[in-house]
Image (spheres, rainbow, N blue to C red):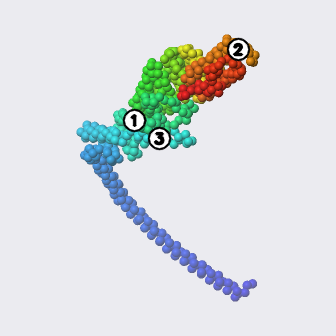
Amino acid sequence: MIPTEDASARKREIEEKLKQEQETLSFIRENMEKSDQLTKGMVSILSSFESRLMQLENSIIPVHKQTENLQRLQENVDKTLSCMDHVISYYHVAKDTDRIIREGPTGRLDEYLACIAKIQKAVEYFQDNNPDSPELNTVKARFEKGKELLEAEFRSLLTRYSKPVPPILILDAISVDEELEVQEDVMLEHLPEAVLQDIICIAGWLVEYGRNQDFMNVYFQIRSNQLDRSIKGLKDHFRKNSASSGILYSPAVQTKRKDTPTKKAPKRPGKDDVLDIEIDSYIHCISAFVKLAQSEYALLAEIIPEHHQKKTFDSLIQEALDNLMLEGDNIVSAARRAIMRHDYSAVLTIFPILRHLKMNKSDFDATLQGTAASTKNKLPTLITSMETIGAKALEEFADSIKNDPDKEYNMPKDGTVHELTSNAILFLQQLLDFHETAGAMLASQETSSSASSYTSEFNKRLLSTYICKVLGNLQLNLLSKSKVYEDSALSAIFLHNNYNYILKSLEKSELIQLVTVTQKKAESSYRELIEQQIYMYKSSWVKVTEHLTDRNMPVFQPGTKLKDKERQVIKDKFKGFNDGLEELCKIQKGWAIPDKEQRDFIRQSQKRVVSDAYRSFLQRCANISFTKNPEKYHKYRAEEVEEMIERLFDTSA
C-alpha cells in the first residue's frame, strides 16, 4: 500500500500541473481569438485596397492612352516641321549657292564640290517629287554651270602647271651609270602634288556625277603638247650644247652592249660633224620618248578611268611619236639620196640609229602595249625601212668597189695606197663598230629557210661573207688599176702598199677575226701577195745587177794585157751599172712605201743584194788595167751604193 501522505502529495502535484495546463490552454484560446480578429481585419483592408486599385486603374489608363496619343502627335508635328524645313531648303539652294558657283572652284575645291553636291540633291528632289516645278530648271541650270566651271578649272590647272620637262632632267632620267649595279630611277614630276590631287578629284567627280568624258580629250591634248615640247626642248638643248662644246656624244646616255663601239670611226670635218649631232640628238630623243611616255602613262593612270586609259594614252603620244617617225623617215630618205650619189659613207649614219631602235624596241613595245595596232607598228616599220636601205647601201658599196674605174689621173704617182683602198677599209672599220646591227641588216634581206632563225652566229657569217666580198672586189680592182702604171716595178710597189695597208688595217681593227670566220687563210693569203709584189719589185734591179755578173767577162792571166774589146766589155759593165743605178735611184726615190717596217725591209734586202754583187765585181776587177781613167768608171764605192739605196722611197730627201 502507498502511504497516505505520499498519495496526497502526488494528488496535489497532479492537480497543480492540471491547473497550469488549463491556464496554458486558456492563453492559447485567447490568442486564437485575437488572431482571428486580426485576420478578419486584414482581409477587410485588402478587399478595400483591391477595390481602390481597380478604381485607380480605371482612372489612369485613359489618361495614359491620351498622353501617348499626344506624344505621337508631337513627334509627327516635329517630323513634319523637319520635313518642311528640308523641303524649303531645296527651294533656297539656288540662292544659297549662287555666290560660290559664280566665283568658281579656284582655291576652294572642297567647298565648291560640297556646294555642287547640295545642288545635285535639289535636282534629284525636284525630279522625284515635283518634276514640273520651275525650281527644277533653276537648280539644273546651276548644276550645269557648276560642272562647266569644274571642267574649266580642270583645263586651267592642267594648262597652268603642265610644263615641258627640262632637258637636264630628261638626260638624267635616260642616263645609265655603268658603275652602278642597280640603277636609280629618276622620277619626273609633271605636276605639283597639291595640283595633281585637285585634278584627280575633279576628274573623279566629272566621271561619277558629271557624266562627262570631254575632259579626257582636254587632258590628252594638253599633255600631248607638253610631251612633244619636252622632246623638242631636249633636241634644241642637245644641238646647242653639242655645237658649242664640240662633244658629239653626250655622256648622259651610256649603254653597255655587246656591239657598243669602243672607239669612234674617224669623221670628215664640217658637214659630217653637223650630221653626227643630228643623229646623236635623234638617238637621245628616242630614249627620251620611251621614258617620258612611261612617265605620262603613270600620271594618266591616276587621273583617267581605267577603261579609258589605253585609248587616251594612244591619243596622247601620237604627235610626239609621229614626229619621231617622220624624222626617222627623213633620215632614211637622206640615206637613199646618198646612195644615189654613191656616197655610201653617209649611209653609215643609219647604223647607230638602227642599233639604238632595236635595243629599245622591247621598251617601246612594253610602253605601247594596249595601243592601236597602227601605233604599235610605227617603230617596226621604221626599223624595216632602215634595214632595207642599209642592206641596199652595203650591196651597192660592194659593187662600187668592184666597178671603180681605172683613171690614170686618179692613180697615186708615188705608188702609195689608193683612195679606194683607204675608203673601203674605213667603211669596213665603221661596220665593225656595228657588226651585230650590220649582220642582222644583211640577214633581214635573206629569204632562205636557213635565215629564218637569224641567230647571232648566222648573222656573223653573213657579215664575214660580205666583208670578204668587198675585199675580193677591192683586190680585183687594185690589180686592174696597177696596170695603168707603165713601170712594172711601180705597179708592184702600188700593189704591195695596198695589200700591206689592207692586212695591217684588218689586224689593227680586229676585222681579221670577222674575215677568218669564213676565210681561214685570209691573213696568210695577203702575206703571200705582199711577198709576190716584193719579188716583182726586186726584179726591176736585175737590169742593174746583170752588169755585175761574169757574163761576157774576159778571161785573163795576171799581168796579161787586155785587148781593146775586152777592156770595152769591162767599161760597158761599169757604165751599165752606174747608169742603171743612177736611173733607178732617181726614179724610185720619188716612190713611197708608207709602212716604215716594210720600207726598211725592202731597202735592206735590196741593199744587201746589190752591195754584195757590186763588191764581188769590184774585187774581180781590182787587178785589171782596163782604163787610164779608172775613176771615170769606178764612180761609186760600195758604201756609197748602199747609201743611195738607203735613200729610196724617201720623198723628203
Crowding around mark 1 (Cα neighbors within 10 Å: few <14, some 14 to 19, many 20+) is: some
Residue at 31 percent across and 50 percent down: it is 82
Residue at 37 percent across and 40 percent down: it is 162
Q: SS for tag 2?
A: loop
| Mark toward the viewer: 1 or 3 | 1
State the quadrant of the N terminus.
bottom right
Taking depth in this image into account, of 161 and 623 the one nearest to the observer is 623
Taking depth in this image into account, of 544 and 521 the one nearest to the observer is 544
Residue at 43 percent across and 30 percent down: it is 270
Find residue 562 and name its label. Answer: 2
Query: Hey, which quadrant is residue 159 in on the image?
Result: top left
> Quick check: 54 left or right of 585?
left
Q: Is residue 218 visible?
A: yes
Q: Hey, what amino acid is under mark 1? A: Asp
Evaluate if marks 2 and 3 touch, with contact meaning CB atoms under 8 Å apart. Answer: no
Q: Hey, what amino acid is under mark 2? A: Leu
Q: Earlier in the sequence, mark 1 or mark 2?
A: 1
> Quick check: 394 left or right of 600?
left
Instruction: Report the Cα–Cα distance between label 2 and label 3.
Output: 95 Å
Image position, residue 553 (x, y; %) = 70, 14
Evaluate if marks 1 and 3 touch, with contact meaning CB atoms under 8 Å apart. Answer: no
Disc 1: which residue: 236
Q: Hey, what amino acid is under mark 3? A: Asp
Query: Hey, which quadrant is residue 196 in on the image?
Result: top left
Instruction: Report the Cα–Cα distance between label 1 and label 2.
Output: 92 Å
Disc 3: which residue: 172
Image position, residue 180 (x, y; %) = 55, 42
| Mark toward the viewer: 2 or 3 | 2
